[in-house]
Amino acid sequence: MRVLLVNMPWAPIDLPSLALGILKRSVDERVPNGTADILHANIEYVDWITRTTEFTLEDYSYYALGSYFLGCGDWVFSSALYDDPQWRVPEFTKAMSSRVRGHRMEMTKALHATAPDFVRGIAERIVELAPDVVGFTSTFQQNTAALAAAKYVKRLAPHIATAMGGANCDGKQGEAVHRNFPFIDYVLRGEGEVSFPALLNALDAGEPLADVPGLCWRGEDDSSVVNAMSTTPLPPASILPPDYSGYFERLASSHARNWVEPKLVVEGARGCWWGEKHHCTFCGLNGSFMQFRSKSPDVFYDEIIELARKHRVLDMYVVDNILDMGYVKTVLPRIIDSGFDLRMHIEIKSNMRQGQLQTLADAGLIFVQPGIESLNSRVLTLMDKGVTGGQNVRMLRDAATVGLSVAWNYLHGFPGEDAEDYDDVVAQLAALEHLNPPVGPSSRIAIERFSPYFNKPELGFSELRPAEPYRLTYDLPDDEMFDLAYVFDVPPRGIGEDVVRRLDQGIAQWKRNYSGSRLTHCDLEDRIVLVSKRRSFDWTYLELTDPLELALFRLLDQPHAVKAAARKLHDAHQVGEEALRQVLARWRELGVVFEDSGQFVQIAPPARNEEFLRIDFMRHTSAREAELAAATV
């Protein structure tokens, strides 16, 4: 049985598809008569569109991820799905004119007009390859491209079985895809390395399909039959490593080779150990399976090293939704000792300590996404994040200390928040300009399928409607659109636009000034020297020598409330709360500490490369030389 797996636009071009890499290996190893190949149609699209259009990596990135909540990438291929190069152009133009402007709007409509030509060519290519089964993966803005290609394949070669899976086919979404698009023979919901080989083996043997978990298939009357999804997630020992054969060669022969450096995609764990107990209210990332499971340290380490050795690529993207903390003591030390100079991206929890972050940095996990999302403890409690605003600021400081780049977003729009939750943060943003800013302006939360906000209307969002881009893209009844959608529009909650404007102005200034801003400290035991270069503070050098201030600054390496700090410092310094408040008020005015919900944390990373030891040495040397000169007169 010949299987062709297809990765349509707008999949990232600098990453091979982990899902298809795993499925390829599962077919090759678990289907006795099966062989699988992968068609990198996302790269094919780059070569196709750049032959006739001024199209750049920035453009591709916009349709792949940058416009996700606007749905531009999916709308581009809706013209192919509905066989109409002018499909809903007036409606899209009117609805998106304030959000997709000028050149971007014109390009979006131009790509929309030519999308049917590309899809037709890909479908012809698929038919020429003569697979028995063609499988499309669909994540983020791949849905309409994948559906359109399947439709054209079925039109050209009805005997080729069409299958579809991926994040856009989880749960009810997969059922809706199968019900509404009859050219899709099979939809696989859940973890495909179980159901896809089971489907292929059943088809090859002519056996019934009722036992394939999560499968949607056609009954004798062509009606949609839905098998129950497995209630037990795949154990980590059964999660296969991916086979990326062909990806790097295809990229090397593409126009896109001039755009990107390819990266490997690796997977150590699925699910979320935090979400199992405290599901963040806005998060729908884990879909139907929240249960956390991770590969054994030996297996994960061997996969990382084998992929790096085989493909001679050191940049890696770790797709785990949260780091298995056990890996900090097992996998990462082995990577440090391996001699491989890896550069990796991973998602972590923001309450990790500096020593743990140092291990990440030493192992090459230099790009982290810690899910900060707010610097206010009350809003973080509404999210059920399990961290405080002070801990998130400490994460930014400690990441700067060990040399980690932090990617994070500032979210708002939570039921129960108010302006006071933002005003005090905004007032302190200028003090943080030496630390990694958010990647963009603040974002009002989107309601995602599978999130607590979606599943529990009592949390504040009872009026859900499929997000507007779905209504501009698909020709479906409202109830079917609801089942298909992953993102939903709701009446806004939380802060008003005046507060959002102040927050975004502060973030914009932070981003503008980040590269030239600086705050560091050097602890010389008998004194602490701070050096600052930030637009809102007129001091550049501050020396702490008072024993109480030295002890307090060191204590504030971790967030502390005034009462707790006074208790810890009382025996050695006989200090009361009021005296500490005076010191902390002055430090806040100087931008030395960040305050949130009554807790304070110092925000100055330690000086690196002994720079300030040299400054201090030169200052005292100059003073001694002056004294000696005066004594000899």
Image (cartoon, rainbow, N blue to C red):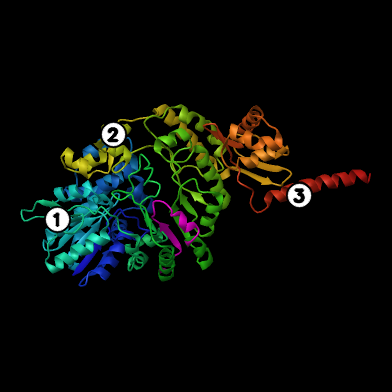
Give the residue type that dot 3 points to: Phe
Is 120 positioned to the left or the right of 556 in the image?
A: left
- Element type at mark 3: helix
Vertical order, 448 against 174 (above or below) = above
| 517 vs 253, nearest the viewer | 517
Q: Where is residue 137 in the image (x, y as percent from the top left)?
A: 26, 56
Crowding around mark 2 (Cα neighbors within 10 Å: few <14, some 14 to 19, many 20+) is few
Count of number-bearing discs: 3
First along the sequence among labels 2 and 3: 2
Q: How far apart are marks 2 and 1 (CA)?
A: 32 Å
Residue 540 visible (yes or no)? no
Q: Where is residue 558 in the image (x, y as percent from the top left)?
A: 57, 42
Q: What stretch is highlighted in magenta?
A: 311-330
First along the sequence among labels 1 and 3: 1
Q: Where is residue 363 in the image (x, y as percent from the top left)?
A: 51, 60
Q: Distance between the residues labelled 2 and 3?
A: 63 Å
Give the residue type that dot 1 points to: Trp
Q: Which residue is drawn at 43% across and 28% down?
A: 499
317 is within the stretch colored magenta: yes
Q: How far apart are marks 1 and 3 (CA)?
A: 76 Å
First along the sequence among labels 2 and 1: 1
The residue wearing badge 1 is 217
Whether tag 2 and tag 3 are in contact, CB under 8 A, the answer is no
Crowding around mark 3 (Cα neighbors within 10 Å: few <14, some 14 to 19, many 20+) is few
The image's mark for residue 617 is: 3
| 537 vs 487, nearest the viewer | 487
| 251 vs 131, nearest the viewer | 131
Quarter of the image that includes the C terminus: top right
Q: Which of marks 2 and 3 is in front?
A: 2
66 is within the stretch colored magenta: no
The residue wearing badge 2 is 457
